Image (cartoon, rainbow, N blue to C red):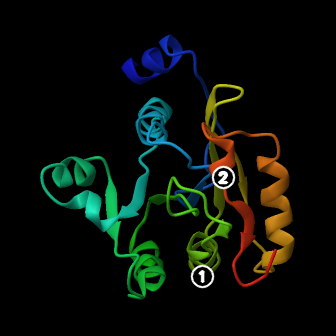
């Protein structure tokens, strides 16, 4: 497969733990570089998994909007509250198979904490959470684990933090702390 070859030639190792079922939310962390997207697309292609992803709506405008949609993108307007999590929960209910990747930092720049939409989506849709990463330190990319969330954010974030400990983004100083802005976790 071409994507596997390209990853290998670039010095990256693909790590994929298959999803436990046909549906899931995939948390991609840390997201600190423009290089994360092409590496993620290569990893997705090499994995054979059909994973959609959520990205800011401005990426879906011409001239590249069609490409981002073709690659499985789902635009989100982060400037206003639109009930986006509820819309995706309904999409999960209506779909037989659906994997959606979300970078909970919401940006490549530094943020003090994660946005909680990925968490609420997985809990409300009743689907497992895949823990995906692009580790520039080990040069590994993929999905390393799947967890079933309890709905207790503080407890679940401990599990998530433990998984990501030691994984390094391209710009480690830009990685957001694995906690929510409301003080949970």
Place of residue 137 in the rendered image (x, y in percent of width and height, measured from the top left): 71, 29
Q: Which residue is mark 2?
A: 175
User: Mark 1, mark 2: which one is toward the viewer?
Assistant: 2
Q: Nearer the viewer, residue 113 or 81?
A: 113
Mark identifier at residue 124? 1
Quarter occupied by the N terminus: top left
Q: Is 63 located above or below residue 77 in the figure?
A: above
**At 62% across and 64% down in the image, what residue appears?**
111
Q: Nearer the viewer, residue 131 or 32?
A: 32
Give the quadrant of residue 184. bottom right
**At 68% across and 47% down in the image, what residue appears?**
173
Which residue appears farthest toward the left when viewing the image?
A: 63
Give the quadrant of residue 123. bottom right
Place of residue 133 in the rendered image (x, y in percent of width and height, measured from the top left): 63, 43
Residue 112 shows up from this direction: yes
Label 2 Cα neighbours within 10 Å, binned few <14 / some 14-19 / many ≥20: many
The answer to whether residue 123 is left or right of residue 75 is right
């Amino acid at each position: 497969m071409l994507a596997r070859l390209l990853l290998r030639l670039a010095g990256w190792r693909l790590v994929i733990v298959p999803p436990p079922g046909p549906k899931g939310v995939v948390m991609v962390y840390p997201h600190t570089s423009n290089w994360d997207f092409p590496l993620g697309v290569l990893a997705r292609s090499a994995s054979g998994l059909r994973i959609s992803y959520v990205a800011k709506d401005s990426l879906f405008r011409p001239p590249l909007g069609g490409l981002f949609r073709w690659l499985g993108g789902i635009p989100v307007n982060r400037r206003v509250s639109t009930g986006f999590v509820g819309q995706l929960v309904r999409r999960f209910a209506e779909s037989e198979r659906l994997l959606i990747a979300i970078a909970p930092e919401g940006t490549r720049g530094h943020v003090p904490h994660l946005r909680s939409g990925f968490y609420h989506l997985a809990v409300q849709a009743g689907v497992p959470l895949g823990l995906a990463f692009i580790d520039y330190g080990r040069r590994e990319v993929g999905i390393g684990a799947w967890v079933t969330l309890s709905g207790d954010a503080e407890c679940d974030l401990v599990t998530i933090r433990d998984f990501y400990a030691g994984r390094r983004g391209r710009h480690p100083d830009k990685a957001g702390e694995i906690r929510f802005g409301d003080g949970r976790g």
